[in-house]
Structures are given as structure tokens and as C-alpha cells.
Image (tube, rainbow, N blue to C red):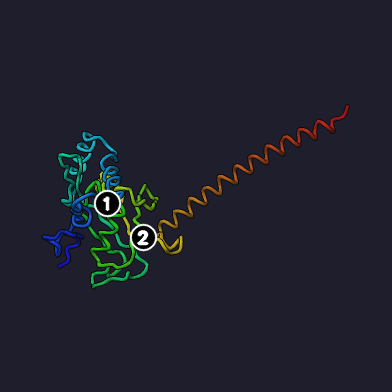
Amino acid sequence: MSSGYSSLEEDAEDFFFTARTSFFRRAPQGKPRAGQQDVEKEKETHNYLSKEEIQEKVHKYNLAVTDKLKMTLNSNGIYTGFIKVQMELCSPPQTSGKLAPSSNGCMNTLHISSTNTVGEVIEALLKKFLVTESPAKFALYKRCHREDQVYACKLSDREHPLYLRLVAGPRTDTLSFVLREHEIGEWEAFSLPELQNFLRILDKEEAEQLQSVRRRYAAYRHKLEEALGEVWKPD
């Protein structure tokens, strides 16, 4: 039975899925693979906020939560929580089963850690739906709403979605996450409100450039007229 949550938990894989089994794989016995130590070191040293700041923000975040999807701060400074990711795929992905998103706009809730990266979130979503296509074909976008403007930005694989969620607060009308293909036409990756926002920005920039050009040529014309007046002034 599908719950709307995405999970890879071994003990609850048909109900509630965290990315623990895919994100926190047990380390292999013996010497770590080449590069693994560097990855772990980067995770340990990549701190956005102090422990006190994180504690305060987690507390404020949980006070603002209305859907019971609260964050939990562990004693080691790592926190866990939930993000919601909307699927905006232009075409049905190739899968090895029947769990592929049935329609555009499918929403998934992921339980993740503050150490989990965008790349890991994408892998977890694809694993949830048994998608066999390469994760490199997909990208995670953050969508920000400010007043009547909509902004979309593709996140790098090393960014941490739960940190972005914590800083923005729990309201999805302030910040939301979208999974899209990014090996398609440049403008096809954006929604209609985002494209309309781009047009408004272009119109504004065009008007500013035109005003700047007019001011420059008006000043040049004024200097020319002054120079001509001096040349033709009668003795």
C-alpha cells in the first residue's frame, strides 16, 4: 500500500521509507576504497551552522510545522527530517517494475539526514520507483516563491536539501523541490509561471538598457550642440 512517503527502510519498505539503506550503507570490511575517506572527511567538515544555531533553527522549524513532519537533532549535530519532492517528468521513465510515477506532478516525501546530498536524494527517488535510467539524466531543482515571482534553480549534486529546508522553514509555498530531466531542451525544463517570470525580467532589463542608451546619446547630443554653438557664434 502506497502512503505518499518514499522509503527504503528494510523494516517498513511498503509504508515509510527513509534513505537510510541507500544513503547510509554499511562500510565494507577492510581498507576503505580510494576516495571514500575524502568523501567522509568532506561530510564531517562541511558545516553550514554552529551546533547552537542548528538547535535554535530546528526548534523554530518544529514550532512552525503543521503536518507533523518535524526535524530531529541528534547529539552529534546531525539532524534528520523530511522534504517533499514533486515529480515533473516530461516522459515516463524506464523502470523494472510498476512503481513509476503514474502522472506528472506526483509528490513524494523523503525522510533524510542533513548529510545527504542532492545526488543521494535523486538516487533514492529513482530507487523508490524502480527507475533503471541513469541518475545523471535527472536534476533536482529548488523553486522559490517571493511575492508574485517564481524562481527556479538547479541544485548541484553536493548541496544538502535538508539544510535548505531548515533555513527556509517548513512552508512549501516559500521553498519546494522538483525532480526533472535535464537532458532536454533548455526551456522545456521550466514551468509556465517560471517562463513568464523570465519574460518579465527580460522586459525590465531591456527597458533599463534602452533608458541607459537614451541618456548616453542625449548627453552626447547636448555636447555636440554646445560645440556647434561655439563654432558658429558670430564675432
Question: What kind of element bears circle 1?
Answer: loop
Q: Mark 1 sits on what residue?
A: 33
Q: Which residue is found at the position 21% from the left and 33% from the top?
A: 52
Name the residue furthest left.
Answer: 11
Compared to residue 20, the image places residue 57 above or below, namely: above
Q: Mark 2 sits on what residue?
A: 136
> Where the C terminus falls, by quadrant?
top right
> Is mark 2 in CB contact (under 8 Å) with mark 1?
no
Compared to residue 139, the image places residue 129 above or below, namely: below
Q: Is residue 173 visible?
A: no
Spatial CA span between label 2 and label 1: 22 Å
Disc 2 marks which amino acid? Answer: Ala
Disc 1 marks which amino acid? Answer: Arg
Which badge, 2 or 1, comes first in the chain's sequence?
Answer: 1
For the residue pair 88 and 129, the one nearer the viewer reads as 129
For the residue pair 43 and 122, the one nearer the viewer reads as 43
Question: What kind of element bears circle 2?
Answer: helix
Residue 37 position in % (x across, y down): 27, 46
Residue 125 position in % (x across, y down): 26, 60
When asked about the image quadrant of residue 89, the answer is: bottom left
When asked about the image quadrant of residue 61, the answer is: top left
